[in-house]
Amino acid sequence: RVLQLQCEKPQYDPIFSPEAFRTLLSSSKSIQSLYLENCGLVDAHIDVLNEELPQNKVVSLLDLKGNQFSDDALYATGCLLPKVTTLKTLDLSGIYITIEAGEALAQGLLQNSTLLYLELEGTAERYKDEFDIPESKFEHADFTRTMDYRLRLNRAYHEAHHDPSHVDNFCAALNSVSDHLSCLYYFIRTYKVHSIAVSRHCNPK
């Protein structure tokens, strides 16, 4: 259930090849937590994740902290987010992110309904709160706002789905993103049936 391949310090050369990584992932579809911190991974490893991880129906944590990715890999990670329907935690801290890569990640997150925790950079204690997107030079960029809104929706829906007493919090989360049309569009498309029920609860008339 847990695969942990980590190094104490960042590596500048991959500790395993993309081919070996493919063999590893294809041989086990029951990994729930995948830790790959400081492994010197490059873009080709993300390509493997894009092909293999959607076949895993239980993975909930992916730690890619401190690897050697370019913008292309982060674009691919954005493409991965809508395809992995069980992922709840993603750690990309220690990876340099440009505005373009951030926008690609945000677009992927818009179409992901399960991610609850996302860390992009910094060395702050992991997941110290429910939406840990640390302050940075991009703190006021549109993509960080999009990510924050989508995480709030995912978290609120997750709570309401598992405990109906949290439905008021879910309604509040919907109201808080009411001016972000992209968030609402993808949310309604993803949760069409549930959103109708919740909207009735929020507006009983």
Image (cartoon, rainbow, N blue to C red):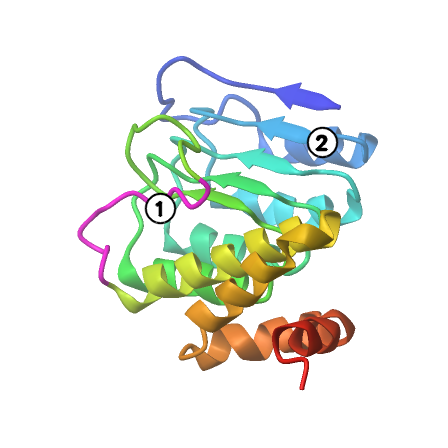
Q: How many marks?
A: 2
Asked whether 134 falls inside the magenta stretch, the response is: yes
Q: Is residue 8 left or right of residue 152?
A: left
Query: Which quarter of the figure has residue 199?
Result: bottom right
Q: Main secondary structure of the magenta part?
A: loop
Of residues 108 and 74, which is closer to you in this image?
108
Toward the top, the furthest residue is 8
Picture coordinates of residue 78, whole percent (x, y): 51, 58
- Chain part drawn in magenta: 130-140
Picture coordinates of residue 45, whole percent (x, y): 56, 40
What residue is at 21 percent from the left and 47 percent from the top? 136
Kindly identify which residue carries mark 2. Answer: 32
Which label belongs to residue 204? none
Q: Given this view, does label 1 or label 2 mark the residue nearer the observer?
A: 1
Toward the front, the furthest residue is 205
Query: Which quarter of the figure has residue 25?
Result: top right
Asked whether 124 falls inside the magenta stretch, the response is: no
Toward the left, the furthest residue is 137
Q: CA distance from mark 1 to mark 2?
A: 23 Å
> Is there CB contact under 8 Å for labels 1 and 2?
no
Q: Give the crowd class for mark 1: few <14, some 14-19, many >=20 residues within 10 Å.
A: many
Three-letter amino acid code of the residue under disc 2: Gln
Mark 1: which secondary structure? loop
What residue is at 63 percent from the left and 57 percent from the top? 157
Picture coordinates of residue 81, whole percent (x, y): 59, 55
Q: Is residue 193 above or below residue 73?
A: below
Q: Is residue 117 above or below residue 143?
A: above
Nearest to N terminus: mark 1 or mark 2: 2
What residue is at 71 percent from the left and 47 percent from the top? 86
Kindly identify which residue carries mark 1. Answer: 133
Three-letter amino acid code of the residue under disc 1: Ile
